[in-house]
Image (cartoon, grey):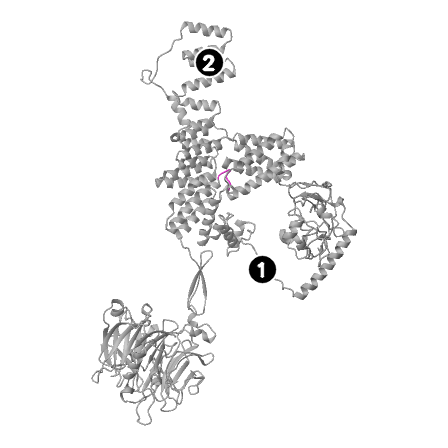
Amino acid sequence: MTIITQIDDRCAALAWSPISSHADIIALGTKDSGGVGFNDYGGELEFFHYDSPQVLGNIKTTSRFSSIGWTSYTASQQYLSGIIGGGMADGTVMLWDPSPLLREKEHVSLISSFKLQQGAVTALKFNPHAEEEKIFATGGTDGQVLITSLERVDAPETYFSSFGGGAVSDSSNRPAMITNLAWNSQVSHIVASATGEGTVAVWDVRQKKKWCEIRCEHSGVPVSDLAWNPTEGLHMVTACSDDRFPILKLWDLRASTSVPLAQLEGHTAGALSLDWCPNDATMLLSSGKDGKTFLWDLCTLKPIYEIANDDINNNASDQHDEYRQQQSSTSIYGINLDSSVTHQQRYDAQWSPLRRGVVSTCSFDRKIQTHSLLSAGVKSGRAPAWLKRMSGVSTAFGGKLVSFGASYPAAINVDSVVKHPAFSKISQKFEHAISTQNYTDYCSAKAQEAFRAENVYETQVWGFMKIMFEENARVHILKYLGFDPAHISALAAAFDYDKSAADVDTSVKVMPLKAQEIIQKSLLVGDFEGAVDCCFRLGNYADALVLSSCGGPELWAKTQGEYFAKEAGKRPYLSIVSAVIHNQLDELVQRSEPRKWQETLAVLSTYAKAEEFPSLCLMLGYMLEESGEPAKASLCYMCALDINRTTEYWRSQYHAELNEDELHNLLALHKFIEKVSIFMYAPEVSRDNLSPETTNLFAMYAKALAEQGLLETASKYCFSNSQSSMELCDRLYNSTKAQGCRQIIGAAPTFPFHAVAVGVAPKRPSNETNTKNKQQQQQRQHNQVQQQQYHPRTSSDALPPGWMALQDPASGRTYYANQSTGESSWEKPMVVEQQPNPEITSGVSYGSQSTGYQQHYSHAGQQIHGAAIYEHSQTGYQQPMEPKQQTQSMRPEPVVNGSSLVAGATPQKAASKYGDGFVSSASHPELGQQYGNVGTSNPYAVEGRPGIAKVSGTPSKAPISATLDLAICSKLASQYQPVADDLLSFLAMLQACPLTLSEKKQLAEIERGVAIFTKKIARDEVDSNVIENVASMMVAIKEKQYTSAQAIQTKLVNTEWAQHKDWLKGMKFLILLIVKRL
C-alpha cells in the first residue's frame, strides 16, 4: 500500500503549497455541498498536512469551487505564505492569504473577490516562473481564457482575453468550454488551453495572440487535461476523456500540430487527469474512468506501476460495512447497482511540487489520498531523477570544499575554506617570524607580550628561552635572576658601615698569655695541628686558618671543614664557599631551600663546571617538583636543556586549558607547539628526543594546519611515528601541494598501511586424483628409502644440535650459526659421538599402506632423545613414526636451487627449516618472498654448478651475533672486565625501570650494542684507545657528568663510526636513557 493518508468525505479541488517552509500543506476547495440540503450552495476552503487527516483550518465560501491554485507570490513580503486563488462555480475568483493560519493558527483572511467568467471558472493556474508569479490564467465554461495580474492585489487587472479560445461548437455556435490550462515550463509568457471540442490552443500572452492550435481529437471529443514537459518547452501531453479514445498523446510542436509524436495506451476508458513529474521528465501520472491510476515510463511508453484504489479504512468491521451498504443510495431504491467502478474513478492526480515522489489523488467516492511513489519509481530499472541530489557539498583534505549545484552547464566547484581564520593567521605569523631565524628577538617580543598580559610564568619562560640563544648564557641567567656582577661589585666597593651600629660586634678577643706560650711552643716543634686546635678552642678562627695553611694540605682541608661547620650557621654565605671549595654543589642543591631556588640557580651558573651544570639544574628541578613547584622546576629543566621534562609541565598546562570551544583549544595547542618549537631550535636540543606524548601533539597540530589548507606548514610538524601522523605524512606527500611538501619531508614516507595479498583458494582435487597421487607418492618414497640405505650420510657431514651451515651473502663462504645461543663461526663445530638410541635405529615398522622410513626433523636448539640429528640435502630420511602415523605417506622434498624444500611449504616453514636472518634470499629464493632480497651477491657464480658457492675476495671475519652472552663477558681480560661490568650493571638497572614503547626499543638497541662490543673485545677487534674512551664514558656516567659522557660518545662516532657503528648507536641510547630514568 502506497497510501500516506486519506481524507474522507471530501469532493474537492486540490492545490499543493509552493512555499518551501510549508511544503507539507495542501489546500482543498470543496466542489459540492456535502449533502447538507438543497438550499446550501456554498463551499469551504480547508487546509491539511499531507500526512494527516486532521483539519488545520477552514473558511466558508459563498460559492463552490470549480478550481483552485496557490502561488508563492508575496506582494513585497506582504503575504509570506503566498496567495491562494479559487475559481468558483459562479464565475468569480476569490483570493486568500493563508499566512495567519499557517503561522499564527488564526483564520484565513480573504484578500479580494471579483467576477471574471460568465460561467464556472473551470481552470485556474498561476504562472510558475519566479519573475511572473503574480500572473494567473483562468478558463471557464464560457470558453474564454483570461490573463490577470496581481500587481495590485486588492484590484487585480485582466489584460488578456482569448475571446473563446478559438474553438466554436458546431451545434450551438458558441465558444467551447475550457477544460484545463497549463503554463509552459520554459517560457514564462506561453500558456496552453484545452477545450471540450478536442483542440489545444497555445497562446503568446506577450504578443496577445494564438501561437498555434493543436487538433488533438475529433470534433466534439473533449481534451480532459494537458501538461508541458518540465524540461523541454516544446513537448506536451494531452488526455482524452472519451471512452472510445482512452489514449494519452505526446506532442512535439516542432514536428507537427496534427500528428502526435507517440501514444500511451493502457487505460480502458477515458483519461480524466494527468500530470508530468516535475522532478523526472521520464515519468507521467494519469488517472482514468476505468478506475486506474498509472505511473508511466516515457522511455518505454508503458505503465510501470498502478496506484491501487485501496481504502485506508479497509480494516473496519463487517457490521460497519453492512450498515454503510444499507444506507447507500442503491439500497434505498431497492436495486443493486454496481457502482464500484464509478466510485473508484479519480478525477485529479497531481505531483507535489516540493516533496519528491509524493502524489495526491481525488476520487468521485469523496476520498482525498496522498501516496508515496519513492519505491515505485525504481520499477523502470533506473533510479528516478528525484533521487538525484540537485546540489551537494563535501569537505576534502586540505581545507577544500567540493560542491555542485543545479546550474547549467553542470560544474563542480572546489573552494578553499578556512574554518578558523584566527588560528590560521597566528600560525602563519609564527612561521614567518621563525623563518628569519632571529629567535632572540622573537623570544624578547613574546616575553614583553606576556608581561603586558601580567602572566608571570610565560614571561619567565620566554625570558629563559631568550637566554638559551645567547653566547654567554650562564652570565645572562645571572642578570635575569637579578644578580648583575658589575652592579654587585660596585656595591661591594662602595660599602661602608658604622662601627657604632647595634648589629656590629666590635669586641676584640685577647688571647691569654698562657695560650700564646703553648701555641708558640707548638710552632717551635712544628706541631701545627696542636696550635690550630688551641686556636679553635679559644675561638681565634682567623689565626687557626693562617696556621693551618702552613701545616700541609690535609690540615688545611680539615681546618676549613671545621671552620665551615662552626660558622656556616651564623654566616649563610659560608655554605656556598664550602660547596665551591670542596666541589660539593650537589649537596648544596640538596640542602637549599625551595623558596630561594633563584639564588641556588645563580650559584650553579657561577661555579658549576660546564659538564656538571645540566645535571645540577636537573637536580634542582627535581627538588622543586617534589616540593610542589612544577612551574619553577620547568624553568630549571629549561636550563638543563631537558626538553622532555620541560614539556611535561607545558602539556599539563595545555590539557588544563581545554574546553568545548574548538578554536580556543587550537590556540592553546598553538601556544604549546610554539614554545616547544623554539626550544628545539636552541643549541644542543634535538627533536629526536621528544617523548611520544609530545610528538602526538605535534601530529595533532599538523592535522589542524592541514585542515586550514596550510599543507606545506603541516609538513614541518608531521614527524611522529604514530599511525595518524604516518597517514597524514603520506597524504601530504601526495597532496595538491606535493612539490613543496616533498621538499620539506624529504624521502618518500613509509606507506602507513600493511598490504595484504588476497589469494584464491586452490581447487580441491577429486577423490580419484587423491588416490592416484597417494600411490605415486608412496612409490617415490619407497625408492628414496632404498637409495638412502645404500648411500647413508656420514657422521662427518652432521652438525651439533642447533647449528646450521649457512652462506655469507657478501663472500659466498660457508659459515656456521647456532640459533639457540646466537654464536657464529667460520670453523665447523664438531659433533660429539654418542651411542645411537635403539628406539631410533633398531628397525623399521612396516604398515599395510606405507613402507618408507620417516625422519623426524628438529627445529633449531631442540634434541630428540639425546641423539644427534642427521639431515640429508635432498632426500628425506625420517625416523619411524607412531603406528597411527605410519600409514600416512610423506611427499619427497623437491630440489629447489640445490636445497631441499617440502612441496607446497610456505616461506614461513622454509624459514623455520633454514634459519631466519642468517639465510640470504639470493641462495634461498623461497625466503625472498618473506624477507626481500637480503643478499646482493650471487653465490652461484660458477656456471653449470648450482649449489656450489663461489668464494671471491679475501676471506672476511664471520658476522657477530647481537645476542648478549654473559659467559663471554665473564671471560674478558682483567683490564677490560670493569668496562663490561659497568655496561651490564647499567643495562640491568634500565631493565628494571618502567619504560615506554619507544624507550623499550632503545633498550633493545643498548643490549645489542653491549653484546657486540663485548664480543669484539673478546675477538681483539677493538683498539685499546677505544676501550679506554668507553671506560672514561662509564666513569662520567657514574659521576653524573652526562655532558662529558655525551662528548666522549660524539668523539667516538666521529672517529670510529666506520669500524664500530654496530655498537656505538647503543651507547648513545644508553646515555639518553640513564639521564631520563636513573
Direction from residue 964 to residue 252 in the image, left or right:
left
Disc 2 residue crowd, few under 14, some 14–19, many 20+, Cα 10 Å: few
Disc 1 residue crowd, few under 14, some 14–19, many 20+, Cα 10 Å: few
Foreground residue among 501 and 672: 672
Above-or-below relation of 124 to 846? below
Foreground residue among 629 and 1047: 629
Boundaries of the magenta span: 682-686
Query: Residue shown at 25%/81% (left/top)?
Result: 34
Measuring from the top left, give residue 560's x and y in whole percent.
Answer: 46, 18
Q: Amino acid at mark 2?
A: Val
Foreground residue among 720 and 327: 327
In reply to whether residue 623 is colored magenta, the answer given is no
Above-or-below relation of 524 to 145? above
Image quadrant occupied by the N terminus? bottom left
Q: Secondary structure at mark 2?
A: helix
Q: How many marks?
A: 2
**Can you name the residue that lies furthest to the bottom here?**
171
Query: Residue shown at 34%/18% (left/top)?
Result: 497
Direction from residue 576 to residue 936 in the image, left or right:
right
Measuring from the top left, give residue 227's x and y in whole percent.
Answer: 38, 80
Measuring from the top left, give residue 753's x and y in whole percent.
Answer: 54, 54
Say whether residue 1053 is visible: yes
Q: Which residue is mark 1?
A: 758
Q: Which residue is mark 2?
A: 546
Q: Residue 726 bears which disc, if any?
A: none
Say whether residue 160 is visible: no
Query: Residue shown at 47%/24% (left/top)?
Result: 580
Q: Amino acid at mark 1?
A: Val
Measuring from the top left, give residue 545's x and y in whole percent.
Answer: 46, 15
Above-or-below relation of 69 to 1049? below
